[in-house]
Amino acid sequence: MKLTRRDLIKTGAGASLVPLAGKWTSLWATGQPMIRTTIPSSGQQLPSVGIGTVKFRGDPASAEMEPLAGILKLFHQLGGELVDTSPNYGNSEEVLGHLLAELKLRDRVFMATKVDREDQAEGVERMEGSLQRLGGRIDLMQVHNLRGTDAELETLQAWKEQGRIGYIGVTTHRNSQHAEMEKVMRNYPLDFIQVNYSLADRAAADRILPLAMDRGMAVLVNRPFGNGELFGAVKGVDLPPWASEFDAQSWGQFFLKYIISHPAETLPIPGMTKPHHVQDNMGALRGHLPDAGRRTEMEKFMDGLI
C-alpha cells in the first residue's frame, strides 16, 4: 500500500512503530504502510526520507568501507530509495558507485547528484564524470548552490529530453540565496529544488515552499536537524507527551516528521553513518504525521529551547 503524506495530513491515518528486540522492525516485515512523497511533475512516489552522503569518503577498496556498505544495505532494507551526493563531497560518488554495485543495489536507488560549474562545457565534463563514477542512471541532476544556473540548466534540460537524466533541479543551503532561488523557480520548469529547512531554520516556509507547491516542484530538504542545533537544544529534554499522537518516539523522528508533514512535497535527506541513526530516521516513515495545529505547537515548543 502506498500512503502519501497528503493522505496522512488529510485523514490522520497511520500506523504506529513496532519495537522488536530494542530495534525497529523492517517496514516490510510488519506490513505497515510507508509514507511517500510524490514528485509533482511525474506522479512518481518516493519514500519520504532519503540519505545524504557527504561523509561517504575514503578508499573504496579498503576495509573502512564495510560500515558504509552496512549503512546503505540497512537504508535499503528499511525502505529507503533516494541517495543524494555530489562531486563536491570528496570522492563520495566513487565510493557510492563501488558500494552500490557491490551490494547489487545500484538499480534499486533513486540517485541524485549535482553539477557545480560556471562554464557549460566544464559542466558537461563534470556530469560525464558523475555518470562514470556512479555507474548507472542519474535520476536527478541538480545545479549545486545555484552556480552557473543559466548555463547548466540549458544542458540539464537537453539531457532530460534525451533521457540521459530523469529530473532536473537546483540547490542551496543558505538563506542568503533564497531570493535568487525564487527567481530561478519562476523562470525554469524544475522538477525539484533542494533547500535548507528545519525547526531551527524555517525561512524557506515563507516563500520558497509555497512557491514550490504553486510551481509543482518536489523539495529535497538539507540540514533537517539544523546542523545539529536541534539535538543540542533538546539534550536532557524529554519528548512532549503529545508527540505520541503522531508516533514520534525520538527527537530525530520529531524533527523529521515536522518536515515531512509540510503541505509541500518535502523529502528530508539527513546524513547517516551509524546503524542506529538509520533505524531511527527511517522510523519517521511510519505512523501518523502532525497536523497544522500540532506543527504550530512543535514550533512553539522548540522556540522555547533554541
Image (cartoon, grey):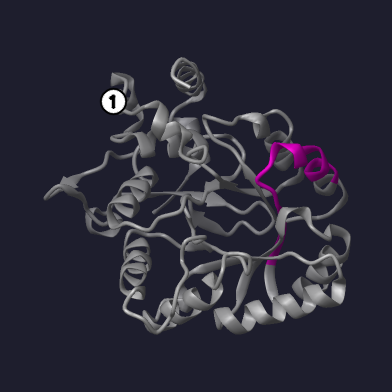
- The percent coordinates of residue 59 (x first, y second) are 44, 79
Residue 167 horizontal side relative to residue 2, left or right: right
- Quick check: 283 left or right of 193? left
Q: Is residue 208 visible?
A: yes
Q: Nearer the viewer, residue 16 or 59?
A: 59
Name the residue: 32% across, 56% down.
Answer: 274
Camera-side residue: 81 or 131? 131
Position of residue 84 relative to residue 5, above or below, is below
* Residue 7 at x, y percent in the picture: 48, 39
Q: Residue at x 30, y 52 (%)?
A: 279
Q: Quadrant of the N terminus?
A: bottom left
Residue 95, position as x, y percentages in the image: 48, 76
- Image point 51% across, 51% down: which residue? 269
Q: Is residue 13 visible?
A: no
The reply to whether the magenta stretch includes residue 179 is yes
Position of residue 66 relative to residue 81, above or below, is below
| Magenta residue span | 167-183
Q: Quadrant of residue 248?
A: top left
Rendering coords of residue 226 (x, y %): 52, 37
| Secondary structure of residue under mark 1 | loop
Identify the residue shown where x is 37% and y is 27%.
Answer: 234
179 versus 60 height, above or below = above
Identify whether 218 is placed above or below 55.
Answer: above
Confirm whether the magenta stretch covers residue 306: no
The residue carrying mark 1 is: 236
Hey, what amino acid is under mark 1? Gly
Residue 106 in the figure: left or right of residue 137: left
